[in-house]
Image (tube, helix red, strand yellow):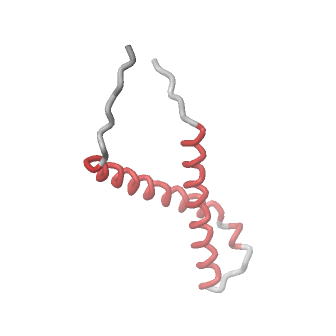
Amino acid sequence: MKDIIIKGTTLRRELLWLLACFVAAFLVNTYAVVHFDRPAVELFSQLGFVVVITACFYIVLAIVRILLMLISIPFRKKQKKIINQ
């Protein structure tokens, strides 16, 4: 069985996407607290819901990124493979 190696740049990029989803979910929660005139303590007491919303945002973002990748495949230039002898 082969080992799976994840490059550091890929890991950092995905963590940044996850952080962006968390910030977006936290901003949605902040808007809801302000809009519905709730106590500020709900910003932190509802962090469980924020994490679930973050996961939903990340899944939707992953689906969109996969679809964009699949759509862009025909438009990519083909690279020549050079075989060193």
Q: Residue at x 33, y 36 (%)?
A: 79
Work out whether 20 lies above or below 12: below
Q: Residue at x 60, y 46 (%)?
A: 12
Most distant residue in the right direction: 41
Residue 82 in the image, given as x and y percentages of width and height: 35, 25
Residue 77 in the image, given as x and y percentages of width and height: 30, 44
Q: Residue at x 57, y 66 (%)?
A: 25
**Relative horizontal placement of residue 41, taking residue 72 as reference (left or right):** right
Residue 85 in the image, given as x and y percentages of width and height: 38, 13
Residue 13 in the image, given as x and y percentages of width and height: 56, 49
The N terminus lies in quadrant: top left
**Relative horizontal placement of residue 2, taking residue 64 as reference (left or right):** right
Viewer-proximal residue among 36 and 63: 63
Q: Residue at x 45, y 54 (%)?
A: 59
Most distant residue in the left direction: 74
Q: Quadrant of residue 11?
A: top right
Q: Quadrant of residue 46?
A: bottom right
Viewer-proximal residue among 11 and 23: 11
Most distant residue in the top direction: 85
Work out whether 45 lies above or below 79: below
Most distant residue in the front direction: 85
Viewer-proximal residue among 78 and 45: 78
Work out whether 79 lies above or below 17: above
